[in-house]
Amino acid sequence: MIYGQASVTVTVSPAEVLDFVCDLARYRTADTKIGKVLSVEPDGDDQIIRFRSRLRDVPGPPVRQRMHRTGDTRIDITDVPSWQNRLVTFRGLFTCEPTETGTLVMHREEFDFHGPMRLIAEPFLRAWLEADVKDEVTRMGRLLGGERAERRDD
């Protein structure tokens, strides 16, 4: 498994942060791994999102993911089961914690490659993913009024 994790403090409320993340058309300005947004469909309290993916500037197939929002504190993102799960499993997380100066946002992305894909993809993507998530959170901070992201390994 490989992952990237970073945090930033922004000047907006937790609700505004998570609203921004849930608006994929806007959030893709921070996350360059999201290509064309194909659909966003409500599913109870969740959203099923479908978009063209891009890892290390390599276009991938469209992916479907479930975004589960827990109030104004957390978003969990998981794969919607498909043939792609034989190759890789994805998990994403955003947490928001109010602070005196705004909101501390932590974002984590994990890719767990399976079988022979692990031997190819993990070395190719590991350092890139760590840097990309930090850059993504830095862009999110700039868009929402914040500081440069800090890499977090906890």
Image (cartoon, rainbow, N blue to C red):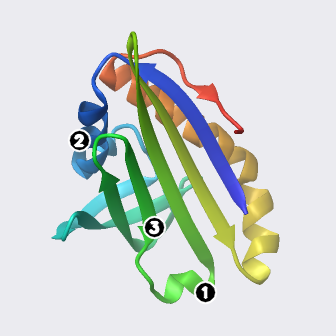
Q: Quadrant of the N terminus?
A: bottom right
- 111 or 74, nearer to the observer: 74
Q: Amino acid at mark 2?
A: Asp
Task: Tell whether 111 sits left or right of 107.
Answer: right
Q: Nearer the viewer, mark 1 or mark 2?
A: 2
Q: Amino acid at mark 3?
A: Thr
Q: Position of residue 95 (x, y in %)?
A: 45, 41
Q: Position of residue 62 (x, y in %)?
A: 39, 73
Which of these two is toward me, 146 or 63? 146
Q: Which mark is residue 143?
A: none
Which sits earlier in the primary sequence, circle 3 or circle 1? 3
Residue bearing mark 2: 19
The type of residue carrying mark 1 is Arg
User: Residue at point 71% right, 57% down?
Assistant: 2
Q: Secondary structure at mark 3?
A: strand
Q: Which residue is mark 1?
A: 86
Q: Is residue 127 left or right of residue 105?
A: right
Q: CA distance from mark 1 to mark 2?
A: 32 Å
How many angstroms separate mark 3 from mark 2 (CA)?
A: 18 Å
